[in-house]
Image (cartoon, helix red, strand yellow):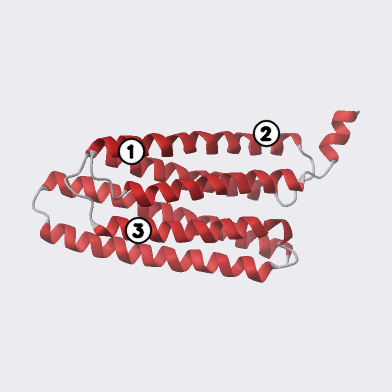
Amino acid sequence: MNSLIDKLKPKENKFFLLLQKMGDLIITASDLMLECVKIATHDEAVSYYKKIKELEHQADAVQGEIFEELNNTFITPFDREDINNLSSKMDDIMDLMTSCSKRIMLYNPKRIPENASNLAVLLRESVGFLNLAIDELDSFKKRPEKIKEYCVQMNVLEKKADDVYEDFLIVLFSEEKDAIEVIKLKDILHELERATDACEAVGKIIKTVIIKYS
């Protein structure tokens, strides 16, 4: 009987706290990415990859907790499908940062272009707005406009990241003569650009939640 009652009790704080915890891990990883794209040695690349990989493991554990709570909770603060999609897409951001740092470590490129730093900065800014939106989720019915603005900013930053990546490709294909380096650098920066795409996708999920309950 008690277990049934527990399932019927709203666990809004639990979900919001877990999403905030995942957001904090993503922020920390994005800070590390800012440094990772400026590494000077292969040993540094290995070190940053290990740090970001550990954060990915922690984020996976948080996502697992969210999944368990969804299975064990009858009443959720908003649609369980939206909660699951939100945590899954946030996990994608972490996965893509891990993938980028792994490629830097494995490929050991001759140089990492300034465009990578520019993308890492845009990603960090986007993640910052993502966290602001997540922090406001527990009151999204009262202050939806503020959250919408954070989501708009994620969209703006994603478009800027697209432009940076496209400009990078134009220069890369016209100036880099080593085909292997072209492949390496294109692959590395593509993961960063995809991470900003994932941030925008999180914003779209959040906007969908707001629309459903407005």
Residue 67 at x, y percent in the picture: 64, 37
In the picture, the disc for residue 68 is: 2
Name which residue lies at 20% across and 44% down.
109
Q: Earlier in the sequence, mark 1 or mark 2?
A: 2
Q: Residue at x 70, y 39 (%)?
A: 70
Determine the residue positioned at 35% across, 58% down. Answer: 119
Q: Is residue 130 above or below residue 5?
A: below
What amino acid type is highlighted by mark number 3?
Leu
Q: Would you say 195 lies left or right of 90 here?
A: left
The crowding category of the residue bearing disc 2, from other C-alpha atoms within 10 Å (few below 14, some 14 to 19, many at least 20), is few
Q: In the rendered image of this protein, does residue 92 appear above or below residue 164? A: above
Are the residues tagged 3 and 1 within 8 Å (C-beta)?
no
Element carrying mark 2: helix
Figure quadrant of the N terminus: top right
> Is 55 on the left-hand or right-hand side of 178?
right
Quadrant of residue 173 within the rendered picture:
bottom left
Q: Badge 3, how many Cα within 10 Å: few under 14, some, many 20+?
A: many
Report whether 51 appears left or right of 132: left
Q: Position of residue 37 (x, y in %)?
A: 31, 49
> Real-space Cα distance between discs 2 and 3?
34 Å
Secondary structure of the residue carrying tag 1 is helix
Name the kind of residue labelled 1 in the image.
Lys
Picture quadrant of residue 136:
bottom right
Label at residue 119: 3
- Closer to the camera, 143 or 52? 52
Q: Is residue 128 above or below residue 57?
A: below
Q: Which mark is residue 102?
A: 1
Of 69 and 21, the residue lying toward us: 21
